[in-house]
Image: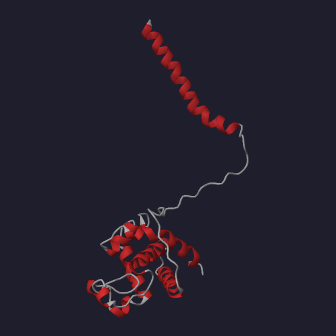
Amino acid sequence: MNTIFRKSMLSVAGLAFAGGVFAGPIAAHANPVDTKPVAAAVQTTAPKPQGDQSHISLNDEQTANAKAIIAATKKAGLPERAAVISIATSLQESKLDNLGHLGDMNDHDSLGLFQQRPSSGWGTPEQITNPEYSTTAFLKGLRQVDGWQDMPLTQAAQTVQVSAYPDAYAQWEQQATDLVGQHWNS
């Protein structure tokens, strides 16, 4: 008798659950409580900036270099995210200064906005110190990174740059995002 009662109760509970599953969505739409439009949050594919963010004030030359990076990115047919990664990388490598040879302070033979090295095949010193050329070279490397669009900025930049400080790029993501937002359509 106990077994029959237990099976009966489980059947009733199962029917109640199934009824709730099927009737729940219908009942939820039968009498809407509030018909006012609701703002929906839009999810972007770009990850949020990681960690503490740094910011520097830019002079006219640095701003022009940021604009040159944006122009080269657009010319390459790449989206704003590529410009954000490029500018953040340049902010870390040179603070958006187009660096020539720095003598004893130079890191090997690193030059330009991205501290690219002629000895590593990035181009000649004249090419690397040309903002359009150096950005195009960086973007060529970025395009070769599978899934760069969806990975954290620092991972995408590091895969191209191979820096001794792989996490340092992340600190510039917000300023780079702001610069691209400000100058992408100008």
Q: Position of residue 94 (x, y in %)?
A: 40, 81
Q: Can see residue 148?
A: no
Nearest the viewer among 79 and 87 is 87
Residue at 38 percent of width and 78 percent of height: 93
The residue at the far front in this view is 104
Q: Is residue 159 left or right of residue 78?
A: left
Q: Quadrant of the N terminus?
A: top left
Residue at 39 percent of width and 88 percent of height: 99
Q: Is residue 73 left or right of residue 140?
A: right
Q: Can see residue 127?
A: yes
Residue at 53 percent of width and 85 percent of height: 59
The residue at the far bottom in this view is 126
Q: Quadrant of the C terminus?
A: bottom right
Q: Position of residue 45 (x, y in %)?
A: 49, 62
Q: Position of residue 61 (x, y in %)?
A: 50, 88
Q: Position of residue 84 (x, y in %)?
A: 48, 73
Which quadrant of the view contains residue 104?
Answer: bottom left
Nearest the viewer among 130 and 52 is 52
**Colour option used:** secondary structure
Q: Is residue 78 above or below residue 110?
A: above
Residue at 35 percent of width and 87 percent of height: 111
Which quadrant of the view contains residue 117?
Answer: bottom left
Number of numbered discs on residues: 0
Which quadrant of the view contains residue 33?
Answer: top right
